[in-house]
Image: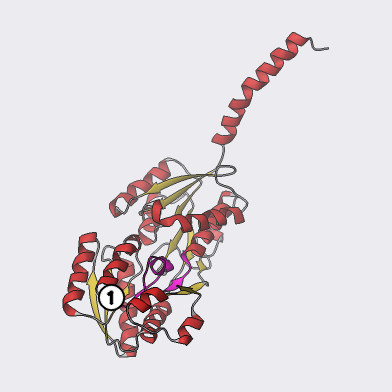
Amino acid sequence: MIRRRDFITLLGGSAAAWPIAGRAQQAAMPVIGLLDQRSPEALADRLRGFREGLRDAGLVEGQSVAIEYRWGDNKMDRVPELAADLVRRQVAVIAATGGIPSALAAKVATTTIPVVFVVSEDPVSLGLVASLARPGGNLTGINFVSAELTAKRLELLRELVPTIARVAVLVNPANVPNTESTLRDVDVAARAMGLQIQVLKARTIGEINAAFATFGRERPDALFVGLDAFLNSRRTQLVNLAARHGLPASYGVRDYAEAGGLMSYGASIVDAWRQVGSYAGRIVKGAKPADLPVVQSSKFELVINIQTARMLDLTVPDKLLAAADEVIE
Protein backbone atom coordinates (compact mmCIF):
# COMPACT_ATOMS: atom_id res chain seq x y z
CA MET A 1 0.00 0.00 0.00
CA ILE A 2 1.35 3.42 -0.98
CA ARG A 3 1.23 6.04 1.76
CA ARG A 4 -0.11 9.49 0.89
CA ARG A 5 3.31 11.15 1.28
CA ASP A 6 4.93 8.52 -0.97
CA PHE A 7 2.15 8.99 -3.55
CA ILE A 8 2.62 12.75 -3.58
CA THR A 9 6.37 12.30 -3.93
CA LEU A 10 5.86 9.82 -6.77
CA LEU A 11 3.35 12.12 -8.49
CA GLY A 12 5.64 15.12 -8.13
CA GLY A 13 8.57 13.19 -9.54
CA SER A 14 6.51 12.05 -12.54
CA ALA A 15 5.22 15.55 -13.15
CA ALA A 16 8.76 16.88 -13.06
CA ALA A 17 9.74 14.30 -15.61
CA TRP A 18 6.97 15.24 -18.06
CA PRO A 19 8.65 18.37 -19.47
CA ILE A 20 11.90 16.44 -19.85
CA ALA A 21 10.12 13.67 -21.74
CA GLY A 22 8.35 16.28 -23.84
CA ARG A 23 11.62 17.99 -24.67
CA ALA A 24 13.19 14.67 -25.59
CA GLN A 25 10.27 13.87 -27.87
CA GLN A 26 10.51 17.30 -29.50
CA ALA A 27 14.26 16.92 -29.94
CA ALA A 28 13.67 13.57 -31.67
CA MET A 29 11.25 15.13 -34.17
CA PRO A 30 12.68 14.81 -37.70
CA VAL A 31 13.78 18.06 -39.32
CA ILE A 32 13.38 19.10 -42.94
CA GLY A 33 15.58 21.93 -44.21
CA LEU A 34 13.96 24.23 -46.77
CA LEU A 35 16.49 26.05 -48.95
CA ASP A 36 15.48 29.01 -51.15
CA GLN A 37 17.33 32.11 -52.31
CA ARG A 38 14.22 34.27 -52.15
CA SER A 39 12.29 35.67 -49.18
CA PRO A 40 9.13 34.02 -47.78
CA GLU A 41 6.82 37.03 -48.10
CA ALA A 42 6.06 36.36 -51.78
CA LEU A 43 5.84 32.58 -51.46
CA ALA A 44 2.85 32.08 -49.14
CA ASP A 45 0.82 30.03 -51.65
CA ARG A 46 3.78 27.81 -52.45
CA LEU A 47 4.53 27.21 -48.79
CA ARG A 48 0.92 26.17 -48.29
CA GLY A 49 1.37 23.74 -51.17
CA PHE A 50 4.54 22.35 -49.57
CA ARG A 51 2.75 21.80 -46.25
CA GLU A 52 -0.14 20.11 -48.08
CA GLY A 53 2.39 17.73 -49.58
CA LEU A 54 3.72 16.94 -46.11
CA ARG A 55 0.17 16.22 -44.96
CA ASP A 56 -0.26 13.92 -47.98
CA ALA A 57 2.67 11.97 -46.55
CA GLY A 58 1.13 11.96 -43.07
CA LEU A 59 3.26 14.72 -41.52
CA VAL A 60 2.26 18.03 -39.93
CA GLU A 61 4.72 20.85 -39.28
CA GLY A 62 5.23 21.39 -35.57
CA GLN A 63 3.56 18.11 -34.63
CA SER A 64 5.35 15.28 -36.41
CA VAL A 65 8.06 17.17 -38.29
CA ALA A 66 10.01 20.41 -37.85
CA ILE A 67 11.17 22.68 -40.68
CA GLU A 68 14.36 24.73 -40.66
CA TYR A 69 13.94 27.56 -43.17
CA ARG A 70 16.96 29.08 -44.89
CA TRP A 71 16.06 32.13 -47.01
CA GLY A 72 18.59 33.98 -49.18
CA ASP A 73 16.59 37.24 -49.38
CA ASN A 74 17.33 37.36 -53.13
CA LYS A 75 21.10 37.20 -52.60
CA MET A 76 22.24 34.35 -54.83
CA ASP A 77 25.74 34.24 -53.32
CA ARG A 78 24.30 33.27 -49.92
CA VAL A 79 22.80 30.00 -51.13
CA PRO A 80 25.91 27.75 -50.85
CA GLU A 81 26.50 28.80 -47.24
CA LEU A 82 22.82 28.32 -46.38
CA ALA A 83 23.00 24.82 -47.86
CA ALA A 84 26.16 24.07 -45.87
CA ASP A 85 24.43 25.29 -42.73
CA LEU A 86 21.58 22.80 -43.22
CA VAL A 87 24.14 20.03 -43.69
CA ARG A 88 25.83 21.04 -40.41
CA ARG A 89 22.39 20.99 -38.81
CA GLN A 90 22.12 17.36 -40.00
CA VAL A 91 18.57 17.72 -41.26
CA ALA A 92 16.77 14.58 -42.43
CA VAL A 93 16.17 15.96 -45.93
CA ILE A 94 16.75 19.22 -47.81
CA ALA A 95 13.89 20.64 -49.86
CA ALA A 96 15.67 22.79 -52.46
CA THR A 97 12.74 24.91 -53.64
CA GLY A 98 14.64 27.82 -55.22
CA GLY A 99 15.09 26.24 -58.64
CA ILE A 100 18.48 25.48 -60.18
CA PRO A 101 20.63 27.61 -57.80
CA SER A 102 19.37 25.92 -54.63
CA ALA A 103 19.38 22.46 -56.23
CA LEU A 104 23.02 22.77 -57.33
CA ALA A 105 24.06 24.28 -53.99
CA ALA A 106 22.47 21.37 -52.12
CA LYS A 107 24.13 18.85 -54.44
CA VAL A 108 27.55 20.40 -53.77
CA ALA A 109 26.92 20.61 -50.01
CA THR A 110 26.11 16.92 -49.41
CA THR A 111 26.34 13.49 -50.97
CA THR A 112 24.54 11.76 -48.10
CA ILE A 113 21.57 13.86 -46.94
CA PRO A 114 18.57 13.35 -49.26
CA VAL A 115 17.66 16.36 -51.42
CA VAL A 116 14.32 17.03 -53.11
CA PHE A 117 14.54 19.75 -55.78
CA VAL A 118 12.15 21.59 -58.05
CA VAL A 119 13.75 22.81 -61.29
CA SER A 120 12.65 24.19 -64.62
CA GLU A 121 15.32 22.35 -66.64
CA ASP A 122 16.13 18.74 -67.39
CA PRO A 123 17.76 17.50 -64.13
CA VAL A 124 19.76 14.88 -66.05
CA SER A 125 21.50 17.50 -68.19
CA LEU A 126 22.08 19.57 -65.04
CA GLY A 127 23.90 16.62 -63.46
CA LEU A 128 21.43 16.35 -60.59
CA VAL A 129 20.32 12.78 -61.31
CA ALA A 130 21.47 9.84 -63.43
CA SER A 131 18.04 9.40 -65.03
CA LEU A 132 14.46 10.49 -64.44
CA ALA A 133 13.23 6.96 -63.69
CA ARG A 134 16.19 6.01 -61.50
CA PRO A 135 17.82 9.10 -59.96
CA GLY A 136 20.57 6.90 -58.51
CA GLY A 137 21.99 9.15 -55.78
CA ASN A 138 20.79 11.31 -52.91
CA LEU A 139 18.71 13.66 -55.11
CA THR A 140 15.29 13.49 -56.69
CA GLY A 141 12.53 15.98 -57.30
CA ILE A 142 10.20 17.77 -59.68
CA ASN A 143 10.84 19.01 -63.24
CA PHE A 144 8.19 21.45 -64.44
CA VAL A 145 9.08 22.84 -67.86
CA SER A 146 10.06 21.83 -71.38
CA ALA A 147 10.85 23.38 -74.76
CA GLU A 148 7.26 22.63 -75.80
CA LEU A 149 5.99 24.97 -73.07
CA THR A 150 8.15 27.83 -74.35
CA ALA A 151 6.79 27.40 -77.86
CA LYS A 152 3.23 27.14 -76.56
CA ARG A 153 3.62 30.31 -74.49
CA LEU A 154 4.88 32.26 -77.50
CA GLU A 155 2.05 30.88 -79.60
CA LEU A 156 -0.54 31.98 -77.00
CA LEU A 157 0.98 35.46 -76.90
CA ARG A 158 0.66 35.78 -80.67
CA GLU A 159 -2.90 34.45 -80.51
CA LEU A 160 -3.75 37.22 -78.05
CA VAL A 161 -1.82 39.87 -80.01
CA PRO A 162 -1.88 38.72 -83.67
CA THR A 163 -0.07 41.83 -84.94
CA ILE A 164 3.23 41.24 -83.12
CA ALA A 165 6.36 40.96 -85.24
CA ARG A 166 9.19 41.70 -82.77
CA VAL A 167 9.28 40.20 -79.28
CA ALA A 168 11.66 41.27 -76.48
CA VAL A 169 12.88 38.39 -74.32
CA LEU A 170 14.01 39.20 -70.78
CA VAL A 171 16.27 36.69 -68.99
CA ASN A 172 18.54 36.60 -65.95
CA PRO A 173 22.14 35.92 -67.06
CA ALA A 174 23.11 34.82 -63.54
CA ASN A 175 20.88 31.77 -64.04
CA VAL A 176 23.04 30.30 -66.81
CA PRO A 177 21.34 26.93 -67.54
CA ASN A 178 17.87 28.45 -67.55
CA THR A 179 18.91 31.43 -69.69
CA GLU A 180 20.64 29.24 -72.27
CA SER A 181 17.70 26.87 -72.66
CA THR A 182 15.13 29.70 -72.73
CA LEU A 183 16.97 31.57 -75.46
CA ARG A 184 17.50 28.40 -77.46
CA ASP A 185 13.86 27.32 -77.22
CA VAL A 186 12.38 30.75 -77.84
CA ASP A 187 14.65 31.26 -80.86
CA VAL A 188 13.47 28.00 -82.45
CA ALA A 189 9.82 28.82 -81.73
CA ALA A 190 10.13 32.41 -82.99
CA ARG A 191 11.74 31.31 -86.25
CA ALA A 192 8.90 28.86 -86.85
CA MET A 193 6.39 31.69 -86.33
CA GLY A 194 8.30 34.28 -88.33
CA LEU A 195 8.92 36.50 -85.29
CA GLN A 196 12.03 38.56 -84.55
CA ILE A 197 13.61 38.28 -81.11
CA GLN A 198 15.39 40.99 -79.12
CA VAL A 199 17.22 39.66 -76.04
CA LEU A 200 17.77 41.75 -72.92
CA LYS A 201 19.33 40.56 -69.67
CA ALA A 202 18.81 41.64 -66.07
CA ARG A 203 20.20 40.28 -62.83
CA THR A 204 19.52 43.32 -60.61
CA ILE A 205 16.71 45.81 -60.02
CA GLY A 206 18.75 48.48 -61.83
CA GLU A 207 19.28 46.23 -64.85
CA ILE A 208 15.53 45.60 -65.04
CA ASN A 209 14.96 49.36 -65.19
CA ALA A 210 17.68 49.68 -67.84
CA ALA A 211 16.07 46.92 -69.92
CA PHE A 212 12.74 48.71 -69.92
CA ALA A 213 14.46 51.96 -70.83
CA THR A 214 15.69 50.10 -73.92
CA PHE A 215 12.14 48.92 -74.62
CA GLY A 216 11.03 52.54 -74.44
CA ARG A 217 13.53 53.52 -77.14
CA GLU A 218 13.22 50.52 -79.45
CA ARG A 219 9.51 49.76 -79.02
CA PRO A 220 9.17 45.97 -79.35
CA ASP A 221 5.64 44.68 -79.93
CA ALA A 222 5.53 42.37 -76.91
CA LEU A 223 7.55 41.01 -73.98
CA PHE A 224 8.41 37.40 -73.10
CA VAL A 225 9.82 37.00 -69.56
CA GLY A 226 11.98 33.95 -68.90
CA LEU A 227 11.43 31.62 -65.96
CA ASP A 228 13.71 32.68 -63.12
CA ALA A 229 13.44 32.96 -59.33
CA PHE A 230 14.94 36.48 -59.19
CA LEU A 231 12.71 37.82 -61.96
CA ASN A 232 9.73 36.22 -60.24
CA SER A 233 10.64 37.98 -56.99
CA ARG A 234 10.52 41.29 -58.94
CA ARG A 235 7.21 40.53 -60.64
CA THR A 236 5.45 43.64 -59.32
CA GLN A 237 8.22 45.82 -60.76
CA LEU A 238 8.10 43.95 -64.09
CA VAL A 239 4.32 44.10 -64.37
CA ASN A 240 4.22 47.82 -63.55
CA LEU A 241 6.96 48.63 -66.06
CA ALA A 242 5.24 46.58 -68.78
CA ALA A 243 2.03 48.52 -68.12
CA ARG A 244 3.86 51.86 -68.16
CA HIS A 245 5.39 51.05 -71.55
CA GLY A 246 2.16 49.58 -72.94
CA LEU A 247 3.81 46.21 -73.57
CA PRO A 248 1.69 43.06 -73.84
CA ALA A 249 3.68 40.50 -71.84
CA SER A 250 3.72 36.73 -71.34
CA TYR A 251 5.00 35.09 -68.15
CA GLY A 252 5.72 31.52 -67.13
CA VAL A 253 3.86 31.35 -63.80
CA ARG A 254 0.52 32.64 -62.56
CA ASP A 255 2.10 34.91 -59.90
CA TYR A 256 2.59 37.55 -62.59
CA ALA A 257 -1.00 37.49 -63.83
CA GLU A 258 -2.20 37.75 -60.24
CA ALA A 259 0.06 40.80 -59.83
CA GLY A 260 -1.48 42.45 -62.91
CA GLY A 261 0.46 40.83 -65.76
CA LEU A 262 -1.42 40.23 -69.01
CA MET A 263 -1.11 36.46 -69.25
CA SER A 264 0.78 33.47 -67.90
CA TYR A 265 1.12 29.92 -69.08
CA GLY A 266 3.10 27.19 -67.43
CA ALA A 267 3.21 24.45 -64.85
CA SER A 268 1.41 24.95 -61.55
CA ILE A 269 4.28 25.87 -59.22
CA VAL A 270 2.06 25.45 -56.16
CA ASP A 271 1.40 21.87 -57.28
CA ALA A 272 5.13 21.34 -57.84
CA TRP A 273 5.84 22.51 -54.26
CA ARG A 274 3.12 20.16 -53.01
CA GLN A 275 4.92 17.31 -54.74
CA VAL A 276 8.22 18.41 -53.16
CA GLY A 277 6.54 18.31 -49.75
CA SER A 278 5.12 14.86 -50.45
CA TYR A 279 8.52 13.48 -51.51
CA ALA A 280 10.25 15.09 -48.52
CA GLY A 281 7.66 13.52 -46.21
CA ARG A 282 8.06 10.11 -47.80
CA ILE A 283 11.84 10.31 -47.38
CA VAL A 284 11.46 11.28 -43.72
CA LYS A 285 9.37 8.12 -43.34
CA GLY A 286 12.09 5.95 -44.85
CA ALA A 287 11.90 6.17 -48.65
CA LYS A 288 15.20 6.56 -50.51
CA PRO A 289 15.59 9.34 -53.11
CA ALA A 290 17.32 6.90 -55.47
CA ASP A 291 14.05 4.93 -55.60
CA LEU A 292 11.75 7.93 -56.18
CA PRO A 293 11.57 8.85 -59.88
CA VAL A 294 11.72 12.50 -60.88
CA VAL A 295 8.18 13.80 -61.32
CA GLN A 296 7.38 15.55 -64.59
CA SER A 297 4.75 18.21 -63.96
CA SER A 298 1.49 17.44 -65.73
CA LYS A 299 -0.68 20.29 -64.43
CA PHE A 300 -0.44 23.43 -66.57
CA GLU A 301 -2.36 26.68 -66.25
CA LEU A 302 -3.33 29.48 -68.61
CA VAL A 303 -4.27 32.63 -66.67
CA ILE A 304 -5.45 35.80 -68.40
CA ASN A 305 -5.85 39.17 -66.69
CA ILE A 306 -8.79 40.73 -68.51
CA GLN A 307 -8.36 44.09 -66.75
CA THR A 308 -4.84 44.41 -68.12
CA ALA A 309 -6.04 43.36 -71.58
CA ARG A 310 -8.59 46.19 -71.51
CA MET A 311 -5.95 48.66 -70.33
CA LEU A 312 -3.80 47.66 -73.32
CA ASP A 313 -6.86 47.97 -75.60
CA LEU A 314 -6.71 44.28 -76.46
CA THR A 315 -9.70 42.07 -77.22
CA VAL A 316 -9.15 38.58 -75.89
CA PRO A 317 -10.41 36.00 -78.43
CA ASP A 318 -13.29 33.84 -77.22
CA LYS A 319 -11.26 30.74 -78.00
CA LEU A 320 -8.52 31.90 -75.62
CA LEU A 321 -11.00 32.80 -72.90
CA ALA A 322 -12.55 29.36 -73.18
CA ALA A 323 -9.12 27.71 -72.92
CA ALA A 324 -8.07 29.74 -69.85
CA ASP A 325 -7.94 28.00 -66.49
CA GLU A 326 -8.62 31.33 -64.84
CA VAL A 327 -9.69 34.77 -66.09
CA ILE A 328 -8.90 37.56 -63.65
CA GLU A 329 -11.56 40.27 -63.90
Q: Could you say which is closer to the camera, residue 55 or residue 48? A: 48
- Secondary structure beneath disc 1? strand
Magenta range is 246-269
The three-letter code of the residue at mark 1 reads Val
Q: Is 248 a magenta residue? A: yes
Quadrant of residue 38 within the rendered picture: bottom left
Q: How many marks?
A: 1
**299 relative position to 227: left or right:** right
Residue wearing tag 1: 169
Rendering coords of residue 101 (x, y %): 35, 58
Rendering coords of residue 323 (x, y %): 50, 81
Question: What residue sits 17% from the left and 79% below the top?
Answer: 218
Rendering coords of residue 9 (x, y %): 69, 13
Question: What residue sits 37% from the left and 52% below the top?
Answer: 39
Q: Could you say which is closer to the camera, residue 108 or residue 179? A: 179
User: In the displayed structure, would residue 97 be above or below residue 197?
Assistant: above
Report whether residue 141 is seen.
yes
